[in-house]
Image: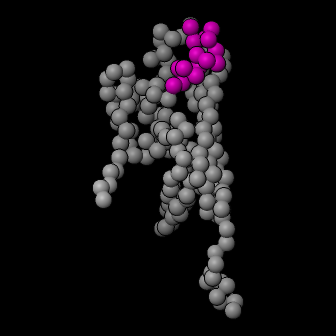
Amino acid sequence: PTSIQVSRLAVFQKEHLAGWLTEEQSKGYSYIVNKVQSTAEYAPCENGKPGGITLEVFDATSKMKAAVNTGKPKVTLSIEIDAGIAKVEKQFERRITTTVKDTINVLQQDLQSDVLGFGELIHRENKTYWKSIRKDWEYIFPEVETDVEVKVNLKRTGTIVNSYQKDMEE
């Protein structure tokens, strides 16, 4: 059987190639635009200890909101993840938050491409403000403040049948 692995995602600014997102940044993009339905995420142990854990993601939903505070646009992203394994929610929340923030930073600072639709979001939320800035959006976009909130809900944690501890008790 043939296997295809995609390791980078092309980003366009208008009709020109602005650059590429890495595999990790491509995952961040997928979380932001609500395109993750099922995947596996690996997180290494904290404090540089060897090992790590893999989390099975069953579903992920994201929501974006825009606001204008003191004349500056701000976008808030909320991502909620349903996954399976035990007692690692915070570790994965930090990992996905870092991935998403890194993706936004690359899009704003390096590629300067609003592929996430922040401009459209601000237009929908505040048409008057959008009219005053739309001509300068390409210069404003890299400076848009973003907040990222990630919530991991563990599902299907279950129990281990014939665990080592149970064998030792018998």
For the point 49% across and 22% down, which residue is it? 141
Total marks in image:
0
Q: Residue 91 falls in which quadrant of the image? A: bottom right
Q: Quadrant of the N terminus?
A: bottom left
Residue 158 left/right relative to 24: right
- The answer to whether 64 is drawn above or below residue 84 in the figure is above
For the point 56% across and 53% down, which residue is it? 57
| Farthest residue, direction front | 1
| Farthest residue, direction left | 2
Q: Position of residue 130 (x, y in %)?
A: 57, 12
Q: Tell me the magenta residue range.
A: 117-131
Q: Residue 113 falls in which quadrant of the image? A: top left
For the point 67% across and 52% down, which residue is it? 153
- The answer to whether 129 is drawn above or below residue 147 in the figure is above
Residue 166 left/right relative to 111: right
Q: Quadrant of the C terminus?
A: bottom right
- The answer to whether 50 is drawn above or below residue 80 in the figure is below
Q: Where is residue 106 in the image (x, y as percent from the top left)?
A: 43, 34
Q: Where is residue 45 in the image (x, y as percent from the top left)?
A: 53, 62
- The answer to whether 111 is drawn above or below residue 26 in the figure is above
Q: Residue 47 falls in which quadrant of the image? A: bottom right
